[in-house]
Amino acid sequence: MSVESEKTTQLIDTNARLTDVFLQEEQAIEQKKQELEGKVDEKIEELEGWKTDFRKLFLHLEVGSVGLLSSGFRSVKINEQTLLTTGRSYGLVVWDILNSKLVHAKSYDIYGDVANAKLLSDDINANLGNGYLFIMNTWDEPSANRLTDELKASMLSLRANMFEDDFGYRSAYMLITLDGKGRLYENLTDFASSSPLANIYLNTFIGKGEQ
């Protein structure tokens, strides 16, 4: 065999060995990738299971109240689901903690019509006595026409402590009460009328075991 032929044969053998090594490494990488993907899928499944278990014990609650001239969140969310985007004046959401379901969600334009104060009062009263979670928020203008005898009495039933305080024009108010247990949260913005700072935002977890 000539020197050139021998070199060519050696080069072919070398290329063949390198090709085998490359294919083996490629197969090993693919196998490792599949193993890692399997572990990632297992971890995602584990985390989803943990999330499901956590949701059995807690509610993730997001609530916002804002005056007209303030920018911000004016909705009620439970477990990332928007239950109500509140219209002018008041919003009321009633949630059945025991069965994890929505009972009631509605806005009440008390500013536009004082008769809506009675509707709000009636809806509060209709849902008392069941251990429900009551969530009240506001948007635009919550101060006018709210202090009717009926609504004041209903708000006392919800253990409201600030509802009869001086509300600034286009202020923001929020109340969260667990019926039978008491007030969990209440806040009122303490700013001058029509303040751009009139907003309240609550992002929290509520333990279902509190019922």
Image (cartoon, helix red, strand yellow):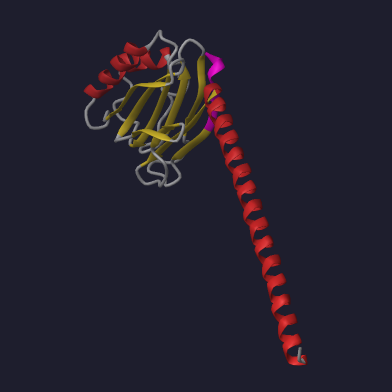
Give the residue at x 54% y 24%.
58
Give the x, y percent position of residue 10: 75, 81
| Residue 92 sits in quarter | top left
> Would residue 205 be counted in the magenta stretch?
yes
Residue at 39% from the left image edge and 21% from the top image edge: 101
- Height in image: 26 above or below 8? above
Q: Is residue 137 above or below residue 97?
A: below
**Residue found 72% across the figure and 76% down from its top:** 13
Looking at this view, is 184 or 26 the one in front? 26
In this rendering, would 140 be left or right of 24? left
Q: In the picture provided, is 121 more to the left or to the right than 203?
A: left
Nearest to the observer: residue 71 or residue 196: 71
| Count of picture labels | 0
* Residue 153 horizontal/vertical position (percent): 37, 13
The quadrant of the picture occupied by the N terminus is bottom right
Residue range in magenta is 204-211
x%, y% of residue 202?
50, 34
